[in-house]
Image (spheres, helix red, strand yellow):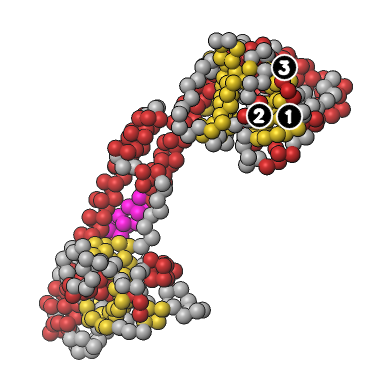
Amino acid sequence: MFNNYYFLRQLSRSLKERLVGMTLGACFSQSKDELMIGFYKGGREQWIRASLIPNFNLLTFPLDYQRKKVNSIDLFKDAIDEEVTDIIQYENERAFLIQLTSGWGLLFKMYGNRSNILLTHEGEVHAVFQKRHIEDQNMDISSLDRELNQTKEGFFENGLRGSFPTLGREVQGYLDTKGFEVQDQEAQWNLLSSMLNKLEQPNYYVEEKDDQVQFLLFKLDDATTLFETSDPIEAANEFYFRFSKRYFVEREKGPLIKEIDKRLKQSKGYLKKNYARYEELTENARFEEIANIIMANLHAIPPRTKKVKLFDFYKDEEISVKLNETLTPQKNAETYYRKAKNQKLEVKNLEANIQQKEGEMEELKKHRDALNDLEMVREIRKYIKTNNLQKLQKNEPVFPFRKFEYKGFEIWVGKNAVNNDLLTQRFAHKRDLWLHARDVAGSHVVVKWKSKQPNFPVDVIEKAASIAAYYSQRKTDTLCPVIYTPKKFVRKRKGDPAGLVVVDKEKVVLIEPAPFSETLT
């Protein structure tokens, strides 16, 4: 309720008692959303700090203030050394004017996120503090006073919002909890009159409810009272202290905790997917067993057979085994042995990836718990810097491609057709090496060029080629032809579907498809 009309009316009365007869001695800003206004009389000072940060529009009233020597700009210079003659509260409006001699004035327009401080002269706007509020330049100050019929009869005729539009959401919410909407007009007027009496001669409360600090002119039944006073200036200072502490702490660590929670959620999804794949591979890892069964029955398999029934001596039952009719039984067994080898490599990679991701999650949880325990902005900033969390603070996007590193070279792999286009058209440099399984659908693969090692080693090309083959429709083939070329020879024609490109110059390597591992397969 800080920007509520009923509080500002009490505040302006209290300011009048303090400021009339004092002289405006300073008006300056040290940040874009804060204005410092200083008054003096003899050895006495009174300051007004106007904090007009979005969602944080508050006034506080320190008795002294030490101005910084840097990053400070003087404002409203024309009114300096003018004396305060009066403070005018506009009727039914969230605005008041500190009237100065020579026709000058400081207009406080406390409209929530549209709050502003205006310098006026002879009833016209002369300058504004927050220039982003363009409409304030042409404000009609003479129209700020609003006469409303707030009698019982006026309430019966115009309703609550028509007669009392300045009550604010806190008062409206309080009335709703008392069943205001379902009562007859007489009962409503009685309830409203009781509330208006509290607002006319209030105490001021800093209340805490649902971990939120609130400023009110009445007590809530289900909130904790942190502070209570009958002095509006004292109340404003106390609320600023308590609210700003929460506000700036939350602003400092809130987005970071939100980003951590987001990444934890993504990591859970990643682990769920990889655990499912791991379970699928380990429970159905029969390629080596099938190869052994074929080798034990070479004599029983007719040539050019697509499918054969063989005795499974592991499970003591007959099973059906698929074969490549163009290969001999022994070559079919070799194919199954190779699949088993690739499967073991994939399991090994999954185990490493799962372990790494679980470690990352534990680290993120540790940071989240530590940040939740910190209550000082300085401590939070120190923790962020010490633990190198700036990258989370900047909300850096997750890397869009699969990424591997082999012998100092980064290998990037597209995930789908659209992602392939993104990799090749936007992320790949003309000197990067581009690879793709020949004549089949598959991932685009890019090996990043290094200025200190301009030529790609043969084993790096073969490693990237095996990955390109693995992430293609030739994944299960014995050998797969993979084209490779500098990215500058890869182009996309207008109108072609996602992932489709034209290669103007290419070389081919015949390679065994394999998932990434540190050793060359």
473 above or below 57?
Answer: below
433 on left or right of 81? left
**Upstream in sequence: badge 3 or badge 1:** 3
Amino acid at pointer 2:
Asp
248 above or below 234?
Answer: below
Name the image quarter holding the N terminus.
Answer: top right
User: Where is residue 465 drawn, in percent x and y?
Assistant: 25, 74
Which residue matches tag 1?
121
458 and 46: which is toward the camera: 46
Q: CA distance from mark 1 to mark 2?
A: 10 Å
Instruction: Please indicate, yes or no, whether residue 141 appears anywhere in the rendered image.
Output: yes
Residue stretch in magenta: 267-279
Query: In the rendered image, which quarter is residue 288 located in?
Result: bottom left
Front: mark 2 or 3: 2
**Upstream in sequence: badge 1 or badge 2:** 2
Mark number displayed over residue 86 = 3
Mark number displayed over residue 78 = 2
At horizontal 34% and vertical 73% (from top left) the residue drawn is 430
**Upstream in sequence: badge 2 or badge 3:** 2
1 on left or right of 376? right
Tag count = 3
At horizontal 40% and vertical 82% (from top left) the residue drawn is 502
516 on left or right of 92? left
Residues at badges 1 and 2 in contact (C-beta under 8 Å)? yes
Magenta stretch secondary structure, dominant: helix
SS assignment at label 2: helix
